[in-house]
Image: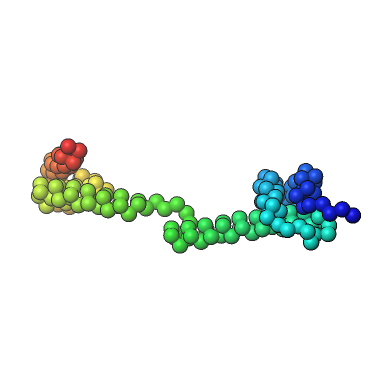
Amino acid sequence: MEHQSLQAVFLAQRDALLRFLIARGAGDNAEDILQDLWLKLADMDDSNIASPLPYLYRAANNAMHDRYRKDDRARQRDHEWSDINRGTGEASDLPLPDRGLIASERLAAIEKRIGKEGPRVFEIFRRFRIDGISQRQIAEEMEISLSAVEKDLQKAYRAVTEWQEREEA
């Protein structure tokens, strides 16, 4: 019996090998697996292979399993990397470190600017905007009129607006 090269048998049986891989569950990866197999065959000495067709089926099956193992390891590695670097692997709602630093610096500058209007203005602004306490409740707690609370909030808002205008300029 004349020896046929693996590449010649591969080309003659390519469609059958493709159907074999699809039937074994390779799905959309079947063409890629066959391409990988073809590249391996190009670098191989096939002179010792007595039965090329069974060898190709076994090699195609092994290439499919190798692909699945490789993909599984990649998914596992990505999952572990995400867990280590993000905590749970889920997208983080936290800002990026540089943006967090910039926001902290801006907040400190705004607080400093409002603080120049006086400690009462800063306290009223903080209680109303950050703590979410009503203007009426702030007035009662500080024993001042509702009008005084409103005027102090207006001072704080003007200070923030002036600060923003200077930052944008």
**In this rendering, is residue 81 above or below 143?**
below
Residue depicted at 35% across the width and 52% down the height: 96
* Residue 35 visible here: yes
Of residues 134 and 13, the one nearer the viewer is: 13
Residue depicted at 37% across the width and 53% down the height: 94
Residue 128, how many percent across, how many down? 22, 47
Residue 56, how many percent across, how many down? 77, 54
Q: Quadrant of the C terminus?
A: top left
Residue 115, how many percent across, how many down? 13, 50
Residue 83, how many percent across, how many down? 48, 60
| Quarter where residue 75 is shown | bottom right
Q: Quadrant of the N terminus?
A: bottom right
Of residues 9 and 67, the one nearer the viewer is: 9
Of residues 131 and 143, the one nearer the viewer is: 131
* Residue 122 visible here: no
Q: From the viewer's perspective, is 103 left or right of 31?
A: left
Q: From the viewer's perspective, is 25 left or right of 166?
A: right
Of residues 115 and 32, the one nearer the viewer is: 32
